[in-house]
Amino acid sequence: MKKISMFVLLIVVVLAVSACGSTPTTPTSTPTETSNSSSSEGSSAAEVSFSQDILPVLNKFAGRAHGNNGGVNLETYENVMKVVVPGSPEESKLYQALTGNGMPQMPPSGKLDDATIQLFYDWISQGAKNN
């Protein structure tokens, strides 16, 4: 029940920010806009790019701790996919770590902003493509 409540709260916050007309910024970039006006079924989010949206955030916030020095390596798509369940953010260890849901909050230096966490949610929901 707590997972659902956190998810609903996250969605409410994202919708509230969107309704205010403000454009949330991320530490590195915003979602890749697509020229195709149709979106994935059930989602109004623009397609999120692994190489342009997700990997830069991982490199910036997780590169030192989760690079090629043991533990969970997040330097490549193949390694990231070891902690991601495509189409299921709530079942993905990566998303759980970003939200602090069921495991320690990552990065330990402080939670990423909601817009950045939403990028990860959207990317995983969209199938976690290597794009």
Image (cartoon, rainbow, N blue to C red):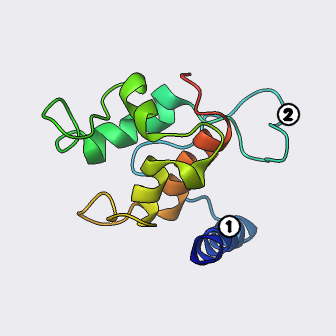
- Give the residue displayed 41% in from the left and 33% down from the top: 82
**Cα–Cα gap, marks 2 and 1:** 22 Å
Is residue 25 among the parts visible in the rendering?
no
Look at the picture and state if 71 lies above or below 100.
above
- Residues 47 and 78: in front is 78
- Residues 112 and 84: in front is 84
Percent x, y for residue 99?
A: 46, 63
- Give the residue displayed 18% in from the left and 45% down from the top: 65
Residue type, mark 1 in image: Ile
Secondary structure category for the residue under label 1: helix
Q: Nearer the N terminus, badge 2 or badge 1? A: 1
- Residues 96 and 49: in front is 96
Q: In front of the other: label 2 or label 1?
A: 1
Residue 17 placement: quadrant = bottom right
Secondary structure category for the residue under label 2: loop
Identify the residue under disc 1.
11
Residue 67 placement: quadrant = top left
For the residues labelled 2 and 1, say whether their Cβ atoms are less than 8 Å apart. Answer: no
- Give the residue displayed 56% in from the left and 59% down from the top: 24
Q: Quadrant of the N terminus?
A: bottom right
Percent x, y for residue 58?
A: 35, 41
In this view, the residue farthest toward the left is: 69
* Numbered mark located on residue 37 in the image: 2
- Give the residue displayed 46% in from the left and 67% down from the top: 101
Q: Residues within 10 Å of mark 1 (few under 14, many from 20)?
A: some
Percent x, y for residue 80?
A: 40, 33
Look at the picture and state if 4 lies above or below 117.
below
Residue type, mark 2 in image: Ser
- Judged left or right of residue 107, residue 25 is right
